[in-house]
Amino acid sequence: MRVKMLIASCDVTYTELISDYISNNYPDILEISVCNDLQGLRETLSLRRYDVALMDTEFIKSAEPGSVKLPLVLWSGAEHESEDETALEPGFVSGLEAGSELRFRSGSDGLSEQLPGISKYQRISSIVTDVLEQYAKISGKRCDPDSKAANITAVWSPAGGVGKTTVALAYAASGAEDGKDVFYLSLESFSSVPVFFSERGKSISTVFNLLDDCEGNVKMLLQGIRCRESGVSYLCEPDNFDDICILSEENIIELVTSCARITDELIIDLSSICDKNTRRVFELADRVLLVTEPSVTAQAKLSQFTSQNTVFEGIREKTTLVANKGATANDLDIERVLSLPYIQTTDASVVYKTLKGFNLKV
């Protein structure tokens, strides 16, 4: 279900530009309507209720109370001059938290800082991100933990430094080249996202902050803040280490299922631990790529995991061993094995690009 969004401004060129861009780039998320005069605004709001409205100050003061769940003022940067304030009509906003007063400064078009707003003159993609982030907090619709749309692949290793992340990203890129909508989700304690992706956006911590909010819509937020590069969607690294460490199993379920509902292929890059959250991802995954390399340490840890850990028995049937850097499968009882070449470079991006062109179909 798309979010019904109204853009109300007397600037016809601006509304045409932003509405055309959103309609062309976010047709599955946002349904756009436009008003360029006050009379048209009143008529529009008398006929239909909107989820979100972006309005210039003179428009928002004339809007019908209760007609918009989340009204947002378009800040032009000149709204901070007058001192006297008069309150908006009560009941205008139906979706904000209790105590969130909206006030106008009388005698000017200025607004107090209490009025939620969106910067008017910024990249349109950033405007969409800000709008969906704010609406996700109040929309009150959550994902069903038992439903998913994407194929989910978990990439894991009991040892660090085996090339797990480069394998995960190469697999993601391979799916993107096949025309699939691919989402790469890094759940590493220390993310490698900055190494492989140049576009910056909002941190994944923005999503974490919403996971425990019973009114929050994680799926909608993900649609708004995900970045996209080389055909692969992703979220930027967390603000700090603890943000990943304190996630509960319930948080993991909601995060993974929400991601799975907005893509065709979900690739989850896990830290090299086997805690309850890792095991929960294994349960949710359709396949597991178990990565190793030739070192004695990596082979010993892999052997311990497959022979001593009951978790492996639960995922054996959906596991593919990825023998990286020229490793062999030895005597492990794993039916599917994918052997990758040893690429002699310390540049992670070179390894990724080389593996991207390798046959990673599993």
Image (spheres, helix red, strand yellow):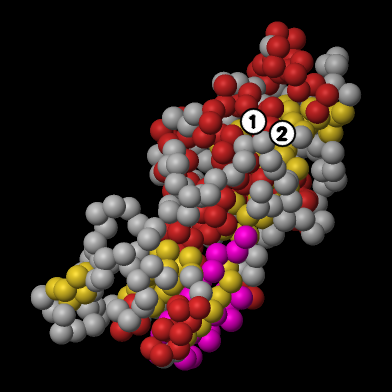
Q: Amino acid at mark 2?
A: Ala
Q: Name which residue type carries label 1.
A: Val
Q: Is residue 226 magenta?
A: no
Q: Residue at x 54, y 69 (%)?
A: 4
Q: Quadrant of residue 209 in the image?
A: top left
Residue 14 is one of the magenta-drawn residues = yes
Percent from the top left, x then y, of residue 275?
57, 21
Instruction: Return the residue at label 1.
Output: 281
| Element on which disc 1 rests | helix
Q: In the displayed image of the protein, which residue is found farthest to the right?
A: 335
Asked if the residues shown at circle 1 and circle 2 are in contact, with their CB atoms under 8 angstroms apart, the answer is: yes
Q: Quadrant of the N terminus?
A: bottom right
Name the secondary structure under disc 2: loop
Question: Is 68 left, or right, of 270 in this rendering?
Answer: left
State whether residue 95 is above or below residue 320: below
How far apart are the two marked residues, 1 and 2, measured between alpha carbons? 6 Å
Q: Image quadrant of residue 122?
A: bottom left
Region of the chain picked out in magenta, as a range: 1-23
Q: What mark, if any, has residue 184 been given in the picture?
A: none
Residue 139 on image: x %, y %: 48, 54
Q: Position of residue 65 (x, y in %)?
A: 35, 71
Q: Residue at x 41, y 64 (%)?
A: 70
Foreground residue among 61 and 195: 61
User: Within 10 angstroms of label 1, few (less than 14), some, or many (20 or more) residues?
Assistant: many
Residue 75: x %, y % from top left: 32, 75
Mark 2 — residue?
285
